[in-house]
Image (cartoon, rainbow, N blue to C red):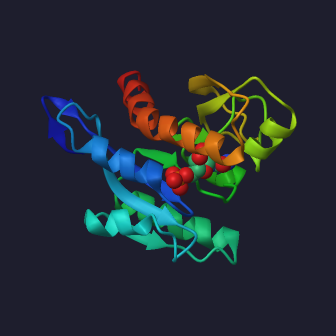
Amino acid sequence: MKKLNGINKKNIAVFISGRGSNLKSLIKYSKLKKSRFNVKLVITNKKEAKGLGYAKKNKITNFAVNYKNKNIAEKKILFFLRKNKINIICLAGFMKILSGKFIKKFKGKILNTHPSLLPKYKGLNTHQRVINDKEKYSGFTIHLVNEKLDSGKKIFQKKIRILKKDNVKTLEKKILKLENKYYPIALSRFLINL
Ligand code: GAR
């Protein structure tokens, strides 16, 4: 843990599977003086994940883990987490479900961002389902990860009104922009109380 202004900065690992815009914003925020965290490690299940570029550019240790065998993959990930003294895991578009065994080892220390107003629209294709159901509102939720999909304790939620002209693409874009803005802030607030 690095010390800054007398604050112990927590080491976080970010897990991604693709684009990595949330990873990018977490890295950017971590460089601010007021940040309570340090992005120490990036893990992906996809070696071609675009987001890995942000880790490389910022010289952050990163690993692409082969997920053919989940048990072996998680053992490797745990090894990297311990080696890098990781305190908190942030899932950011990580499209694999962590096992109960893994989650227990980091109980209360794994955060996820999900693009819906949980407990509504757990799982995949959230924006499409929201549009199909003609919902008036959507948003995103940052929550703790437990053994049940998208069901852990809520840490932060932001709601937006869906406009008549919105479609899956525009809704995704608006919500992603908010996730990018608020994930680091929600994480910082969470760390204060840890
Ligand atoms: C984000 O919208 C995140 O909420 C979603 O994937 C996107 C990742 O974007 N996660 C899930 O749907 C998980 N169930 P990013 O790769 O640009 O950060």
Furthest residue toward left: 5
**Where does the image place residue 28, in percent across and percent down from the top left?**
29, 47
**In the drawing, does residue 149 fall left or right of residue 60?**
right
Residue at (35%, 64%) from the top-left corner?
55
Viewer-proximal residue among 105 and 7: 7
Furthest residue toward right: 133
**Where does the image place residue 162, in percent across and percent down from the top left?**
69, 28
**In the drawing, does residue 3 fall left or right of residue 167?**
left
Viewer-proximal residue among 160 and 27: 160
Residue 101, can we see it?
yes
Residue at (58%, 69%) from the top-left corner?
45
Residue 107, can we see it?
no
**Where does the image place residue 129, in percent across and percent down from the top left?**
82, 41
Viewer-proximal residue among 91 and 76: 91
Viewer-proximal residue among 72 and 42: 42
**In the drawing, does residue 91 fall left or right of residue 137?**
left
Taking 91 as reference, is 42 above or below it? below
**Where does the image place residue 145, in percent across and percent down from the top left?**
63, 40
**In the drawing, does residue 183 fall left or right of residue 144?**
left
Locate the C terminus and report the quarter of the image it occupies. top left
For residue 137, which quarter of the picture?
Answer: top right
Residue at (15%, 35%) from the top-left corner?
4
Residue at (33%, 51%) from the top-left corner?
39
For residue 111, which quarter of the picture?
Answer: top right
Locate the N terminus and report the quarter of the image it occupies. top left
Taking 138 as reference, is 24 above or below it? below
Taking 84 as reference, is 7 above or below it? above
Q: How many marks?
A: 0
